[in-house]
Structure formats: C-alpha cells, structure tokens
Amino acid sequence: MSSFNHPSDNLEHSILEEYSIVERPEKKKKLGVLFWICVAWIGLNVIGAIFAAVLPLQNPLYENFSAINLGPSLHHLFGTDDLGRDIFARVTYGARVSIAVGTGAMVIGFGLGAPLGMLAAHRRGRFDAILTTVMYVFLAFPAIIATIAVLSFWTPRSLLKIILVIGLASVPLVYRVIRTATLNVATKDYIIAAKVQGATDRRILMKELLPNIAPVGISFLLIGVATVVTLEGALAFLGLSVNPPTPSWGNMINEARTVLASNPWLVLFPSAALCLFLLCLNFIGDRLRSHFDVTEVKL
Amino acid sequence: MLRYVAKRMVLLIGIVFVISVGSFYLIHLLPGNPATVILGFGATPEAKAALYRQLGLAHPIYLQYFTWISNVVRGNLGTSFISQTSVASTIRSALPIDLEIILLSQILAFATAIPAAMRSAKRPDGPIDRLLGAGSFTLLSIPPFIIIVLMVLFISIKLGVPHTGPSSYVSFGTDPLGNLESLSLPSITLAIGSFVVYYRILRSDLISTLQEEFITMARSKGLSQRRIMWSHAFRPSSVALLGAAGVNIGGLLAAGFVVQYLLAIPGLGYTLITAINMSDFLLVQGIVLTVSVGVVVINFIFDFIINMVDPRISRE
Amino acid sequence: MSPDKLLVVKDLSTTFATAGGPLPAVGGVSFDLGQNETIGIVGESGSGKTVLSRTIMGLQPRTNVTVSGSAQIDGFEVVGASENEKRKIWGTEVAMIFQDPMTSLNPVMRIGKQIDESLRVRLGMSKADAKARAIELLELVGIPSPAERYSAFPGQLSGGMRQRVVIAIALACSPKLLMADEPTTGLDVTIQAQILNLLDELKERLKMSVILVTHDLGVVATRTSRIIVMYAGRIVETGSTRDVFYHHRMPYTRALLESSPKVSNHSHTRLVTIPGRPPNLLKLSDGCSFAPRCKFATDKCHLVRPELEPSVEPGHSFACWNPLPVNGEEPTS
C-alpha cells in the first residue's frame, strides 16, 4: 500500500513521502537570534517593572516645574513631561500597569477558560453543548463594548477591577480556542486508545491532551497578553484606565496628545515602549507557534 | 442549503434575544434606582414619577422587558433625558458614518491585501514576500490609536494642519470629496490593521492551497499561472479570508470607536463615549444594543457568503 | 519533424537538494515509448517511479531540484524547458492523471467547469461548444446522466466517478501521451478494474500511448506491452511484459512477483515479503542498491553497481551480477 498524499503536504514533501522509511535528516526549525532578542527585551521590561522601586530612577510622580518639557538629557534620559516629571521613570513604572493587566487578565482568562475548554472538548455530551452555546452567545457580544460599558459605570476604578473585567471578558475566547485545539487532538485515535485502556479522565487530560495543546495554548497566551495590553492602551485613551497620576503607557500617550507639537518626546517614548513590547510578544508567540507546529508547510 | 440557512437564522434570533436581554438589564445592573440613575440625583419627584410610568418600573421585571422590547422593535429606543432627543434618531444620524468608515477601510484593505498576498504566495520567501512579511508584522504591533496619534503628529508638524473635530466632518450628500477627506484618517488607520490580518491569512492559505494536487493538475492542463492563481487557488483560499473578514469587520465597529473619539468624528463611537461621560444611560443602552446586534448580523451575513463560496461547509 | 518514438528518455536523473545532502530520487533512466504503446513502470514506495513520472512531464517542483539528461515528448525537450514552453505541451500533447481523485480535483469548482477550462483556454472553444464537448467527454468516460453531472461538485461524486472525471479532464484536448500515476490505488478494488478497463478502451479509441505507474503488478500484467522495474531510482529490469513476468533475471523482480498475493494460491498461504527496507537514498552505496536485501548477493554485488545488460530475449535487459538462470518454461497458469 503506497503512501497517501495529505493535501497539505507541499509537493516536495509528498514526493519524499515515498521515502517515508528513509531517515530524513531533522530539519529543526531554529528559533533564531531574533527570537531570543525579543525574549530578552520582554524580560528586561518585566524586570524593570517588578524592580522599578529599587532601581536608580527618578520619582515618576515628582513634579518639577523648573524642568518642563525638556528633551532627553543625561539627567532625564527620556526628557520630562509638561509637569516636569521624568519620562524615563514614568515609562518604566508604566510597564507595571501594562504587564500587570496583560498577565492578570490572561491568568483569569486562561485559568477559567482553558480548563473549561479542555473539559468540554473531552467530555462532550450535554455538558459541552450547554457550555459551548453559552460561551458562543457571550462571544457574539462585542467584548470591547461590554468592557467599556462596565468599566465606565463601575467606579471608582482600580487596577484590580480593570484586570478583572478584561480577564472575564476574555474567558469565552480562550474557551473557544482551547476547546477547538483540544477537539483536534481528542478525536485522534490515541486518545480513544487511552480511554479504552481505562485511563482516568484526569490522566488523559494531563498526560495526553495537555502536552499536545500546550504549544497552541502558549502562543495564544502570548498573543492574548499583547491584545490585552493594547486594550489597556485603548481604554486609557477613553479615560478608562488607571487614574492619573499613576503612569501607564496608554495614559502617557493620551496625555501627550495635547502637547503633541511642543513635546513630541512625550508621545514617542511611551509609544515606542508599547510598540516594542507588543512587537516582541507577537514575534515570540508567532515563532513558538511555527516551531511547534510540525504539520505546518515550510514557508 | 435552505435548511442550513434556517438553522442559522434560528441561532441568530436566539443570540439577538440574549443580547437584548443583556442590554436591557444593563441599566438595572447599576447601583441604585434606575430612575435616579437615568435622571441624575438632581431629578425632581415629578420627573421621576413620569419616568416610572414611562418605563413601567413599578411592574415586575419581565413585564418591563416586554414593554421595552416592544418599543424597541417599533423603533423607539426611548428619549434621552440629557439631550432631549430620541435615542433612535441620534443613532440613526451617527450610524452611517461608522458604516462609511468601515466600507472605505475595507475597500482599501482588500484592494491592497489581495494582490500583495497573491504576489507573495507565488514566490514565498522572495524579496517582496520578506519585505511585506516584516512590514506587516511590525504594523501588527502598532495599535490603531498610536497610528492615529503618530499620523496626527506627522501631519500637524509637517503640514501644520489642525486635526479634525466634529465640525469638520462633512456628509457625503453635501460634499463628496470633503466627506472622503474628513474620513480619510480613520479609514486609513483601520485599513492598516485589516490589511495586516487579511494579507497574512490569505498568503498563508494560498501557499498551502498551492501545494495541493489539484493545482498540479491545473498546471498539467497547461493553464497560465495567472489563471491558476485566480481561478483555482484564490477561491478555496478566500474562505479563510472571508472568515477573517467577518470577524474583523465585526470587531471594527467597536475598534473604530477609539479612533473616532480621537478625531472627534461624530460616529457611534464618539457618541457612545460622550454619552458615557455625560451619564446618558439610555443612549448608552441604545448604542450597545444596536452595535451588538449589528455585529451579530454582520457575522451571520459573512457565514452565508462563505457558504456560497465553499459549499462543503453546509454539507457537514 | 516527426520522430517515430513518441517519448525518448535518455539518462534522466532527478536530484533533490535536501538538508541532509543531495537525494538522487531518479538516476540515469533511459527508455522510449512509441505511438499507441502502453508501458508499465513498477516499483515499491521509494523506487522513484512517481518522481520519474513528474520529471518526464516537467511537473517536478521548481526549487531545490536538479534534473539532468533528456526527455523528449514528440521531439519537444522537457528537461530545461521554461514553464511557458512546457505549458504548450501540457494538456494537448501530454496529460497526467493522479492517484487521489479527491485531491486532484478542485473541490470548490464544478466538474463541468474543470473540463471546460482546458477546452476553452487551450483549444479556444466557445462556451457553448465547450460545454457540449465536456458532456460528450463525461459520457465517454462512462458517467451516467452526464448533462446533470456537469454542474456537480467533486464532493458529490463517488471515488470511481471522480477518477473518471479526472480522466475526462486529461483527455479533453486529445493528448498523445497519458501519464497515469497510480490511477487506481486510492479506489475500491471493485472500481479499480472498471477504471483500468476504461483506460484500455479509451487508449484504443483515441490512439493514445499510456504510461502506467504503479506498485501493483496486477495492474500491469495484462494491460501493458512492456514493463520497467525500478528500484532505488534506477531501472533494474525492463522488457516485454511476458518476459518480465516469466523470464525475469533480476532477483528483485522475482521478489516483487512473489510478494503479490495470487488468487491461485491456497488459502492460508503465507504472504511473502521482501526482508529489509528500501535503501536510504542519501547514503547509497557504490554497489547494487538491492544487495543488502538480496538472497543471491555476492561480494561483487556489494561493491560495484551493475549496469543494464541484455538478456536472451530481444528488448529484455536487467542489471544484476548474479542473475537468475535463463528460464525457458512458461507456467501454465
């Protein structure tokens, strides 16, 4: 019986499929230098955010009216804003908000959405049907609007509330992605084989399903963090992020709008910080996805 | 086929129903008495009583819902107490702007993404492909509001032109060219985000479609590359593109809000945010309902289109 | 210029550039094919037969592939020709049908249109003419109610029907040479015979030459005049069908024949398999590629690769240092 060509193999693959018994040399998809640079940058941001208080930074809240709207200098690496506050310090502290919101919301989203998704895909039946329908209805409701609405009415605002709202809003999406990924794996024969062997649900979940959906999950997680961080930025523009004077990248960019022409640094630095952070996150998520996806066509 | 449509319609109605309940209940979720919430603390007892009667607040909740939904279906979304204008008419004047922005941005996005993706898929990893890939990836990481800010910065510094405000928006009927110009910034901004998504998805799908055997078969028939790309490769790949478009456009309605607000263009987004700031809850409720239903309907339409292009789906 | 041979292949080699080094999928294949002739190319998975079929057509992938040698279809040199040049003969001089009809048909295009396409683009037919001809073709390949089926999608047809449609498409512009790569492997056994009979019938009617590429000896036994046996990318035996079946000299050919189950075997006859595995093409030895698995291998077999040498019968040659003895008997079954 000759080998069957799977439609998604590239032509070279399908020809080489005839040599399936041949030891094909491992074409390992290297993650690449750029990947690790991005990881380093994210790491830098995280460390900066966590240890901001002990780093030799200026006080981000200290208003120095004799040093307004200065450009970058040795004393103020990124310059100062229109209240004389050091931008570099504010950007570093601003990372806290973005990272906290990003990770916090994703923790909630994945903490709730992922187990439910996996369980639903695994168990099927009534449980799955009901839960999925509910989730899909929630999905149909544009999350951004709900987030805006809730956050604007639920005052006073706090970082915790923001994390909570965004986190809960992301649960249906996480649920759907994880459920689909699990379904792809769960219908494979080796899962059925495990079931027949009498493995308990828990065992199947941990040993068989989890490792297989982990790659998809992780890259989705990273992309999710990026999306949430962007969302925080957008909310800041609507005045729905953390209250000033707490610095957040979104806040800073928003405040900078009014003094756009006179102090472009106020916009550029937090924007650059935000964009670089997102870029690295997206890149890492993308690379991981293609690294783990063995069936992906070599592009 | 008909059965498929009918099934989806039922689903659509179900979702719309749930959304309506959610929107309706929004007001009741807020702390305090709905009347106080809507009218504000300075409301007179007479005003409160009038509102009570109008909204039927004394009745049990499901009756209230019924009153509300029967009004809604008739097009009556209530009258805002802040602006004293009917919510429905406010929405009606703001909605076309959103739709126009979406239309313009999508035209731009498709017109650029499709040829770009076709070109890249023909020679993957070639110089153009790499350039577009890196470029689109970078653009992906720049949120729309930053694009707007940077664009405004660029424009005001280089050209010294003040950015838009609600007065600068010109309707299509009055002045088509001016209309396009006033909407150009938000359209371009949204187009960029859409371009990135469409380009990547179409390219990836095209590349995998091109590996399929029926493409080799088409080649062996002696068909030209152009024909193969457009007639054979594009159609199956467009399914994924349409799927992405559906999701994207659904999200655009909401995503455009921030952009609108920044440029003070009086679309639904701007209206919603100002409504929130002014605590005009009836208007907020009306907009939330309209937008949610709109998104769902758009998704439904796209599902339908996808089914026409690839009939395999309805046969499942 | 009209050569008497429809297809002349000389020393054709196809090498893939892989991460592990050059992979010689096809090495030094030479044969020719006349008008109205049907030959079979037989081999296991990994023998190079599919790569050979595509290389002859000129359909090999464009990147990381090197082709050397020559393959002339009706005088047209395929090796080294540009895509534009090859396009001129694709469909009109030579056509190909593939193994899996589900993947060789565009799933979202109606089958009528897929046939029309060739007619309109290559032959310049009008829409109405093309449709009429397409329906004729559908009837020719034995599809019932062709006028209705014209607007069907591939997914609405059964496997056998689909393959018939593929054949119809291939024949649309009346090619002189048909390359059939495992045309029946993906089909039910009962349908296989139907399709093969259809091909027989059509090639008679349309005066076509056919190359049947397969691993299944049963397919080629009664339908070809000549057989080429391939192993590890090279021809190891070739001759008339009769000679290859009854007077073969190369032990691999025997092993291949022995390993196909025969109806005449007693029940519970053990399936004979060839021990070992096909060789790793990246690490071919200097000797005969089959030597590691051959019962009759000698030292020389491991060290020096045998070239094709003629056997007794005309047109029959084999590549082996220790061939089976010349056998004058023909079994009566």
Image (tube, rainbow, N blue to C red):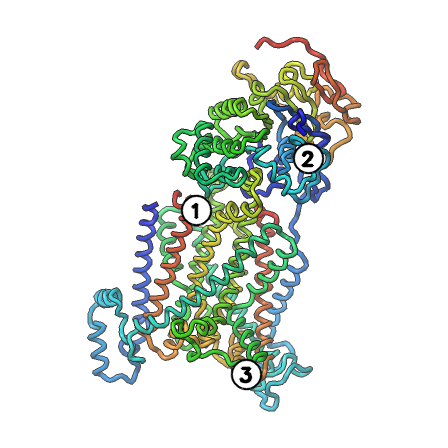
Q: Label 1: which residue?
A: B310
In percent of width and height, residue B208 lies at 55, 47
Q: Is residue C258 left or right of residue C107?
A: right
Which amino acid, by three-letter code, is at mark 3? Val
- Report whether residue C196 is seen: no
Q: Which quarter of the figure is the N terminus of chain A placed in?
A: top right
User: Which label sits in the foreground, 3 or 1?
Assistant: 1
| Image disc number at residue C77 | 2
Regarding mark 3 in the picture, which secondary structure is present there? helix
> Which chain does tag 3 point to?
A
Same chain check for tags 1 and 2: no
User: Which label sits in the foreground, 2 or 3?
Assistant: 2
In percent of width and height, residue B64 lies at 23, 68
Which amino acid, by three-letter code, is at mark 2? Glu
Instruction: Kindly identify the residue that appears in the image at 56 percent across and 30 percent down.
Output: C182
| Image disc number at residue B223 | none
- Nearer to us in this view, A153 or C122: C122
- Nearer to us in this view, C254 or C190: C190
Instruction: Answer whether labels 2 and 3 touch (C-beta < 8 Å).
Output: no
- Report whether residue A140 is seen: yes
In percent of width and height, residue A101 lies at 50, 69
Same chain check for tags 2 and 3: no
- Nearer to us in this view, A224 or B244: B244
> Which chain does tag 1 point to?
B
When the figure is inspected, residue C308 is found, relative to residue A176, above or below; the finding is above
Which amino acid, by three-letter code, is at mark 1? Asp
User: Which label sits in the foreground, 1 or 2?
Assistant: 2
Q: How far apart are marks 2 and 3 (CA)?
A: 71 Å
Same chain check for tags 3 and 1: no
Q: How far apart are marks 3 and 1 (CA)?
A: 52 Å
| Image disc number at residue A259 | 3
